[in-house]
């Protein structure tokens, strides 16, 4: 019986104290053997009971009525049983309702929920075609929620409001329709969505509902989305995959947000009106928009924090920000992201306009097809992007458009990141020390990415496997267990050095060096007490004899007093070998 059995065991332990000090243990009520309808079984159940429903089609709209009970099919983890155990809402309201402060002990598992149009919310709108939660936090697992809602429904698949925190795990939420949140709608709530498939839902515009949030819509909410597949959803206006607004702060971790679309902005994700979502280790790929934000759009004072995400192959047909679009005084923080192979007219990788100030750090922005790596709008409300320790490389239209090129300063480079495969979308960086291959495990390459061990010195790197070079990698896998490893250490070949010094007639000193291999040489001048007097700039010298000149002046520019001085030479070869030599000179 799978999940149902586990719930039953928990229920048996939930013994209810009754008058006289007695106790009542949980029982199993079978449908249709014991009760002909699911609602009839719920009505007869008490806390801790389990309602087990046999395969069949049940034309009902059920309400848990606040009861801490489990309602499940005969085998909730068997897809064939789930497909054959159907609760049909007959377009007469929500298929399943939780509205009396149900907690996690109220559980629904192993059904196909279909043909619900939503709970009539005070005659104002329909809510929750498949599942309706108001002030409730039930557990909803291993269900298929499909074919519910209409353009007049908020939350075609699932609706949450009024402080609800339902746990939704292992569900398939597919082919639902809604004006806002065709798949899942949450307002003033904090649902937890884990390991769900949210696919092919459509947020369809119907006055006055504009068609927003094809997969998930959140308003004044803090949902947690972990390891979900959010795929091929559509919104007529914005947020094909996910839309958050009104100071929402969702947390999205390890989700795959792919193939979603919108008629305007935010093909993958749309953030609006002071939102502060946290996105970690997500794949945001192949999403489409018309005006902006193929992968992600942040708008109107939104400040998302994006870390360790892959944002690839998204596109905007006639607008801004193929990967990421920043607009309207938004200030996203993009740290250790890989933004690759996206396309837009303006900012194939990242665009910023109207006072937005994105901060890019430890990131790779490369091979974007159109519109440049970073595009900065030059009209009203100037932008102030900040780019540090990042690699911008081979972006069509230029790495930086309308912005000074920072390559060579603040840790920024422009070098081929040497991804494992652009064709298959494997953006792990090639490494002589070891690269994670999802199909083979750790493999070694003949070449080594310049993005390994070149991120910000202040960034944590402790999650990277050893050898990690003592410094974070750039890109989406920096400071993760799948970060490419440092190159193997090669024993340094010794370098031999000798030095002589001779005063010239003008009060200067000529220094002659002999090197057994090319090296970088640093010359310091000390008095006999060992205090520094002067230093020559480092010089890259060839093998053999080289001559350097000290002009006899101190670091401050004054003439050094007559007397004896020590000349200390330190040489470091390309192999890493280092040696030093001393010479003396008498200035007169």
Image (spheres, rainbow, N blue to C red):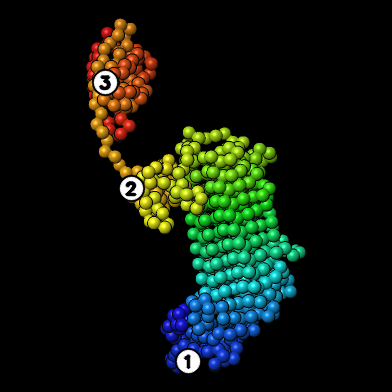
In which quarter of the view is residue 191 placed? bottom right
Name the secondary structure under disc 3: strand
290 vs 127, nearest the viewer: 290
Name the secondary structure under disc 2: loop
| Cβ atoms at labels 1 and 3 below 8 Å apart | no
Instruction: Name the image quarter holding the C terminus.
Output: top left
Q: Relative to 550, does residue 458 appear above or below in the rendering?
A: below
**Of marks 1 and 3, which one's residue comes earlier in the chain?**
1
Measured Cα–Cα span from mark 1 to mark 3: 100 Å
Q: Residue at x 62, y 65 (%)?
A: 200
344 vs 526, nearest the viewer: 344
Q: Which residue is mark 3?
A: 514
**Of marks 2 and 1, which one's residue comes earlier in the chain?**
1
Q: State the mark number for residue 467.
A: 2
Looking at this view, name the residue that lies furthest to the right. 207
Q: Which residue is mark 1?
A: 19
Measured Cα–Cα span from mark 2 to mark 3: 36 Å
Name the secondary structure under disc 1: helix
Q: What is the crowding at mark 2: few (fewer than 14 residues within 10 Å), some, or many (at least 20)?
A: some
């Amino acid at each position: 019986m799978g999940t149902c059995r586990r719930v039953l065991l928990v229920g048996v332990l939930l013994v209810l104290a009754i008058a006289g000090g007695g106790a009542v243990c949980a029982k199993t009520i079978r449908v249709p053997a014991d009760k002909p309808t699911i609602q009839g079984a719920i009505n007869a159940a008490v806390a801790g009971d389990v309602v087990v429903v046999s395969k069949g089609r049940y034309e009902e709209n059920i309400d848990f009525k606040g009861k801490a009970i489990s309602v499940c099919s005969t085998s909730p983890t068997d897809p064939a049983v789930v497909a054959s155990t159907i609760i049909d809402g007959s377009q007469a309201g929500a298929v399943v309702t939780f509205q009396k402060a149900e907690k996690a002990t109220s559980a629904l598992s192993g059904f196909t929920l279909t043909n619900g149009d939503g709970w009539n919310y005070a005659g104002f709108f329909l809510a929750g075609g498949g599942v309706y939660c108001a002030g409730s936090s039930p557990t909803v697992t291993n269900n298929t929620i499909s074919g519910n809602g209409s353009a007049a429904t908020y939350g075609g698949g699932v609706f949450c409001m009024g402080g609800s925190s339902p746990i939704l795990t292992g569900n398939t939420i597919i082919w639902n329709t809604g004006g806002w949140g065709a798949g899942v709608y949450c307002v003033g709530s904090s649902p937890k969505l884990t390991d769900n498939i949210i696919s092919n839902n459509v947020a369809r515009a119907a006055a006055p509902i504009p068609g927003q949030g094809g997969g998930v819509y959140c308003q004044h909410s803090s949902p947690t989305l972990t390891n979900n597949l959010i795929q091929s959803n559509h919104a007529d206006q914005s947020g094909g995959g996910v839309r958050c607004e009104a100071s929402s702060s969702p947390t999205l971790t390890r989700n795959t947000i792919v193939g979603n679309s919108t008629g305007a902005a935010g093909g993958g994700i749309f953030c609006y009106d002071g939102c502060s979502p946290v996105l970690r280790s997500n794949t945001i790929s192949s999403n489409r928009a018309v005006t902006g934000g193929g992968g992600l759009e942040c708008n109107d004072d939104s400040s998302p924090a994006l870390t360790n995400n892959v944002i690839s192959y998204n596109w905007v047909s006639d607008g801004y920000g193929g990967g990421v679009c920043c607009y309207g005084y938004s200030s996203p923080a993009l740290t250790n992201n890989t933004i690759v192979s996206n396309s837009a007219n303006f900012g194939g990788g990242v665009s910023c306009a109207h006072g937005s100030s994105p901060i890019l750090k430890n990131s790779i922005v490369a091979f974007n097809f159109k519109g440049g790596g970073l595009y900065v709008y030059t009209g009203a409300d100037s932008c102030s992007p900040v780019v540090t320790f990042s690699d911008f490389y081979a972006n069509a239209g230029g790495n930086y458009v309308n912005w000074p090129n920072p390559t060579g300063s603040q840790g920024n480079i422009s070098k081929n990141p040497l991804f494992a495969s652009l064709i298959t979308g494997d953006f792990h960086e090639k490494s002589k020390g070891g690269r994670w291959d999802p199909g083979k495990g750790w493999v070694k390459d003949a070449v080594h990415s310049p993005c390994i061990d070149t991120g910000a010195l202040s960034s944590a790197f402790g999650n990277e496997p050893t050898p990690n070079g003592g410094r974070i990698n750039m890109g989406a896998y920096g400071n993760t267990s799948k970060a490419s490893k440092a190159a193997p250490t090669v024993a340094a070949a010794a370098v031999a050095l000798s030095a002589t010094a001779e005063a010239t007639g003008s009060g200067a000193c000529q220094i002659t060096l002999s090197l057994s291999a090319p090296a970088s040489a640093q010359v310091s001048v000390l008095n006999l007490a060992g205090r520094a007097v002067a230093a020559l700039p480092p010089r890259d010298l060839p093998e053999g004899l080289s001559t350097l000149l000290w002009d006899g002046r101190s670091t401050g520019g004054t003439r050094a007093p007559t007397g004896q001085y020590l000349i200390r030479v330190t040489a470091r070869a390309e192999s890493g070998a280092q040696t030093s030599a001393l010479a003396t000179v008498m200035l007169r």
